[in-house]
Image: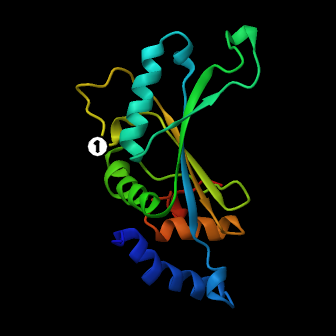
Amino acid sequence: MKKTPLKGHYNEVVKKALQEKFKYKNVMQTPKVIKIMISMGLAKASQDKQHLEYCFNDLKLIAGQLAVPTKAKDSISNFKLREGQVIGAKVTLRGDRMYDFMYRFTNICVPSIPDFRGFKRKCDGRGNYSLGIKDQTIFPEIDLDKMKCSQGMNITFVTSAQTDAECIELLELLNLPFVKLSNVKV
């Protein structure tokens, strides 16, 4: 099995840098990215069934694997929502596909975001980092001529880091661009 460039970078550079900075006693304590979850909320799907198909196709192209539908657990009449109705799509990436996606995301997609100054340095307190993308057109896999609708998505990087500082350092060493510390307003 071939190594992805980012996986090799993690094994050769990132592990050593994290071990030096956080003084881990054991190599196995070094944090790593466990999985990447990509999800879309499909509010328009209740009115337009084709919108659902377009979003599933786009997510399949972006992630490289089939998306799983997420369904409503309860009925809510104010939102015209019925139990069991498809309200979203999600994909969980692990292993080489995860590293491939992260490499493409950090080196190809993020630079194409207009007026981009970096992602916020805020994790969830358990070593996981989530970010939102307003439009799927930043991904080169999406053909703009065939695109029917614009749809945002959430991307969550699940890591084995114990603290937010370890998580941010890990993702920063894996080339995820964060806001520079000098630009952060207190």
Q: Between residues 18 and 145, which one lies in front from this camera angle?
A: 145
Q: Is residue 139 visible?
A: yes
Residue receiving disc 1: 140
Q: Report x, y in % for residue 31.
A: 61, 73
In the foreground, 91 or 12? 91
Identify the element where label 1 is drawn: loop
- Residue 74, compared with residue 80, is above or below; it is below
Q: Which residue is drawn at 38% across and 50% down?
A: 110
* Residue 24 image-quadrant placement: bottom right
Q: How many residues crowd around disc 1 within 10 Å: few (fewer than 14), some, or many (20 or more)?
A: some
Q: Is residue 114 visible?
A: no
Q: Is residue 7 left or right of residue 179?
A: left
Figure check: 151 above or below 163 = above
* Three-letter code for the amino acid on which mark 1 is drawn: Pro
Q: In this view, does 72 lie to the left or right of 18?
A: right
Q: Residue at x 74, y 8 (%)?
A: 77
Q: Percent x, y for residue 137?
A: 34, 35
Quarter occupied by the N terminus:
bottom left
Q: Nearer the viewer, residue 86 or 182?
A: 86
| Residue placed furthest toward the bottom | 25
Q: Is 140 placed left or right of 35 in the picture?
A: left
Residue 177 in picture, x, y percent from top left: 45, 59
Q: In this view, does 144 lie above or below 131?
A: above
Colouring rule applied to residues: rainbow
Quarter of the figure with the C terminus: bottom right
Quarter of the view holding residue 142: top left
| Residue for point 43% across, 51% down | 117
Residue 175 position, x and y percent, is 43, 65
Query: Which residue is drawn at the image coordinates 35% and 55% (left, top)?
Result: 104
Please, is residue 177 above or below residue 114 in the view? below
